[in-house]
Image (cartoon, grey):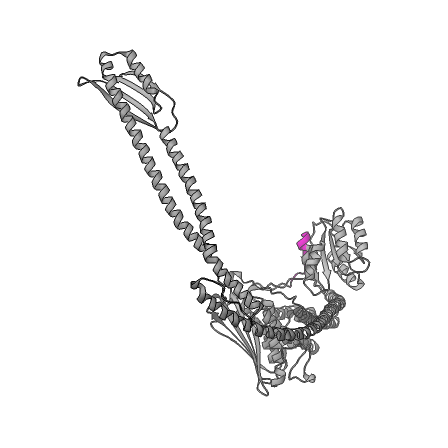
Amino acid sequence: MRVTPNKTVSLSRRLSLALVSVITLIVVLVATGFYLYTAAELERNFTRKEEETLSYLDGTLGRVMWYFDHDTVTRVAKTVLRDDLVVGVTIRDEQNKSIISISEQSRGDVLVRTRSIHFADSLVGELELVFSRAHLTDALTSILLISLTVWLLAILSIGVLTNLFIRKFFRGPLMSFTDLAESYRRNPESPPSNATRFLEFQPIENVVKILANDVFLKLRELDDHRRNLETTVAERTHDLQIARNEAEAARAKAEVANQAKSTFLANMSHELRTPLVAILGFSELLGYDPDSTTAQREKLAVIRRGGKHLLDMINDVLDLSKIDAGRVELEPADFDLPRMLQDIGLMFEGRAESAGLRFELELDPALAQYVKTDAGKLRQVLINLLGNAVKFTGEGGVSLRARTLPMADDPSMVTLQIEVEDSGPGIAPEPLERVFDPFVQAGRSKSETKGTGLGLAISKSFVDLMGGGIGAESEIGKGSLFSVDLPVALAEAAEAGGVEAPRPAVRGLEPGQPPWRILVVEDNPDNRLLLSTLLALAGFEIREAENGEEAIALFEQWQPHFIWMDMRMPVMNGYDATRRIRTLPGGNTVKIVALTASAFKQQREAILQAGCDDVIHKPFKADEIFDAMAQKLGVRYRYEEAAAEPAGAPVEVTAEAVAALPEELRDTLRDAAVTLSNEAFDDALVPVRARDPALADGLADLAQNFRFDRILELLDE
């Protein structure tokens, strides 16, 4: 508890204030009484003079009014006006008709008095006098000013006298105790004699002497402690300074190492993704060639799967580096939780069955349907946990369980509890403690594992970022249990988004459009060729530039509608080239979209600030390229026509139709189905479509509905 020190006050000041207040009150009361008495006397004198004036005029005017001597009445009225108190005279006859009315300007309040005039017991007229109260008001004001002056002088005198009195007979003796304490401080062994001659203060003086002696002894002890403490603090400060210098040096080294790691990862991301653009892009482009043979399409599918696997491994390493650098941000969205869990369950059910394992999906009946959190990261966590469970379990099964529990303190939130249990070999206690560390595959032999060993580390980082917790339990020979507790918000059905249906490939431009001029700025010749070929096949007019300077020159000469701008180039990079183009005539209207192999999304803001309209990350897909130009320019495309199907009923796939395929083609389909990837399965369907389009459509329909289990059954029959 915080203690507030008492505020010091002056006792002499308080005594002075009290005495002055009492005496002031007395003076005020006396002055007020004097003023009220004087005002009453003046009021009585004023009233008496009014009566005397009225009585005199009543007696004087009676006879004059009886004989109706108008001149005399006028003289009497003017004579009355000479009085300072009278400012108006009105005389009326017995019929209330005015005989004479005379008035003067008056300041202040007036008093009107009326009296009937009689003579010989008969009413002969009426007299009205207007009296001025200005003289009375002036007199009262003068008295008030005199009273206030006397009161202020009295207060001032009383204050001065009171202060002198307290200084001499009260404050002086008390201050002598301060001199006594100061004498003790200077020479405690020879204290002075009595500090005051007043008997009433002798007990206080004795107490001061005792306290001063005790304080002196305590101060001596404190001084000894202070010297010891200063010595200790100096030693500790020296040690802390050494430790701080070592910590600063270690921190500086760590920052240099972290910066070097970030730079290395950024460069490696660019260097690895750049060739992947050509590998994945050209394999996709060649897959559209109707003249390619079945064997060629199968080999292209293998290339695409290998490239995507490599890209996934690169993304794992980059995800971990971004987590370490604090660059990962949550992207919460509303979604259907049971549907997502069922989709993931269907994905791993087929993979588990192909490995001879049992898969169980247990969803609590009270599981919340629509929730809001980062669905992408949650999905990645589940895929990592289930992927490990299937990969490292030789026999038995894998279970995925989920339920939601309400939060007592917030009805809009629930706790999502997820468990992934397997019957694998288990993990020993010591490796289990490090199971969430990067590059750790605890309890697994090198011969039976593959991958980066980053899945669990990334999963833990994602769960921590979403405000949840993840744990693991395991016993050798009995399997492992991974559990996730995650706070999620409840959402409405209308807010949860659906699943986007796949779109057919672009085959050209719709007629009736202007010739679109597209400038491709890319220093890598393979990537430049890929993008230019993709756009040229769609019907665009293409020009190419290898660096920013060439891009500026071509823009001034050709005035393209759209520019694909690589950001890392020699001579002049994409940032500087975009800024220069925006300053040129027509630069404000051209659409510029950046192409970057960097995986760090934080660079997006810098790219947009340079003047780009959007950012596409390498390796890109054809749909991303065409969608960007449709959004920015309003380009309309012709798409690949889907094979006609009978209206109303889906295509039925029979085991006989699947068995008619060559064994090599069936093995390719089986490998693609085990990956639970629609893209990989679509690639494997390319040669099937060339042989039997109806069968390919039926298998594609099963894959779109995540019926990989049914596909595997058909392949195994």
Q: Nearer the viewer, residue 555 or 90?
A: 90
Q: Nearer the viewer, residue 124 or 604?
A: 124
Q: Position of residue 286 (x, y in %)?
A: 75, 66
224 on left or right of 150: right
Q: Residue at x 29, y 32 (%)?
A: 44
Q: Position of residue 370 (x, y in %)?
A: 51, 66
Question: Is 699 drawn above or below residue 497 in the view shown?
Answer: below
Q: Position of residue 164 (x, y in %)?
A: 47, 52
Whether residue 547 is visible: yes
Question: Is 136 drawn above or below residue 462 in the view shown?
Answer: above
Q: Nearer the viewer, residue 505 or 574?
A: 574
How many marks the image carries: the answer is 0
Picture quadrant of residue 571: bottom right
Which residue occupies the extreme bottom position in the image?
Answer: 477
548 on left or right of 482: right
Magenta highlight range:
630-642
Q: Position of residue 319 (x, y in %)?
A: 67, 70
